[in-house]
Image (cartoon, rainbow, N blue to C red):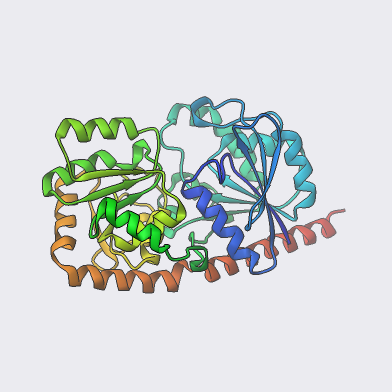
Amino acid sequence: MNVLQFYRTYLPESHGGVEEAIRQICIATGQHGVRHRVLTLARVSSKEVIERPEATVIRAPLQWEPASCSMGSSLFRLYREHAEWADVIQIHYPWPFADLVHLLSGVRKPVVVTYHSDIVRQGWLEKLYQPLRKRFFRRVSAVVATSPNYLDSSTFLQRVRDKCTTIPLGLCPESYPGPSAAAQRSIKERFGSGYFLFVGVLRYYKGLDVLVDAAARNGLQVVIAGKGPEEANLRARVKQRGVGNVHFAGFVSDDEKAALFQSCRAVVFPSFLRSEAFGVTLLEGLLYGKPLISCDIGTGTTFVNIDQQTGLVVPPRDSMAMAMAMRLLHEDHQLAVEMGQRGRERFDAVFSGDKVGSAYADLYSTIVNQESERFQEAP
């Protein structure tokens, strides 16, 4: 089985939740004999091909980014070319340009859409986009929601519910090796241990200003790992408020990230908008047996983090509630340990790579067989 993954960004140029989700799907389904190519855009002058352990990555030149919608004219040709190789095409939504590329390419292959998020910020552009989206989703064979919470709460997914199934994001533990001794020493020298950790791209919907305010209230140590468009604003907020207990780790290697998770007290995830549909960082917290603190925003974050079981769930944009949740886990070490243990048990039961890989491999086979039967029945 050959599957073409199609999304606007990918490793190694961009490190975010969707990119990691694609990597994990490739790894997990690869154990079932599925071969992957990832077609994406990057800041390159001409087409590049990179061989990675999980997939062959084809990078086309990025030319425009209106309203964060990455575009590149060479994708039309490359999409047709690599769709010929594929048995299934998996498109990661939202990315309106992908809809256009698929419709204009004339490709007639089964398409799975993994629905990562509603379009939240660009509301007026979404209205212009609706006719294109409607036509595109008519051509789609299956739509995958990443949690039952998001499927039930998304207005758009209700319109295509007959095509929907739910497969959560997952992680293959073997793709997360333990940290080296050098990384452990470096992290402990820089940040100590028992801190509250955020890992991710620093975007507007992540609610990190609330985390800074919570840290100002409780005085607990916070480490923010990652880069992104909100970094300058966050640093300015920390300086303005004189918060000396918030530390910016910047972009970290996988080795350093593993050491950060190993030494933290808990993982904090203050995202407050539906743009945060799931939260791969929350999965990573479960994998490392750490309690979680997240916000109740009606998405997959509360599917991953079960309040009072795997961690604590607080109202969005509430720095006082966030500060109190952090204080509770800081002061009650046994509670933090027990929540972390239950989190790892939930990870193994629901979010392991084996389960996710089997679910996607079965879905690929099902839609390929359905398309084959439809072709045979056609006059």
Please determine whether, in this image, residue 107 is positioned above or below residue 62.
below
Q: Is residue 19 left or right of residue 199?
A: right
Residue at point 12% right, 49% down? 218
Number of numbered callouts drawn: 0
Query: Residue 337 appears in which quarter of the rendering?
Result: bottom left
Which residue is situated farthest in the right direction here? Answer: 379
- In the rendered image, residue 371, in percent from the top left (x then y), is placed at 75, 57
- In the rendered image, residue 196, in percent from the top left (x then y), is placed at 25, 54
- In the rendered image, residue 107, in percent from the top left (x then y), is placed at 76, 43
- In the rendered image, residue 128, in percent from the top left (x then y), is placed at 53, 27
Residue at point 37% right, 65% down? 286
Say which of 122 and 342 sits in front: 342
Q: Is residue 319 left or right of residue 276?
A: left
Query: Residue 346 appears in which quarter of the rendering?
Result: bottom left
Residue at point 64% right, 69% down? 31
Say which of 375 and 230 sits in front: 230
Residue at point 67% right, 61% down? 364
Q: Is residue 343 visible?
A: yes
Quadrant of image for the N terminus: bottom right
Q: Is residue 52 left or right of residue 197?
A: right
Say which of 102 and 197 sits in front: 197
Q: Is residue 113 left or right of residue 118?
A: right
Query: Residue 134 appears in which quarter of the rendering?
Result: top right
Q: Is residue 302 visible?
A: no
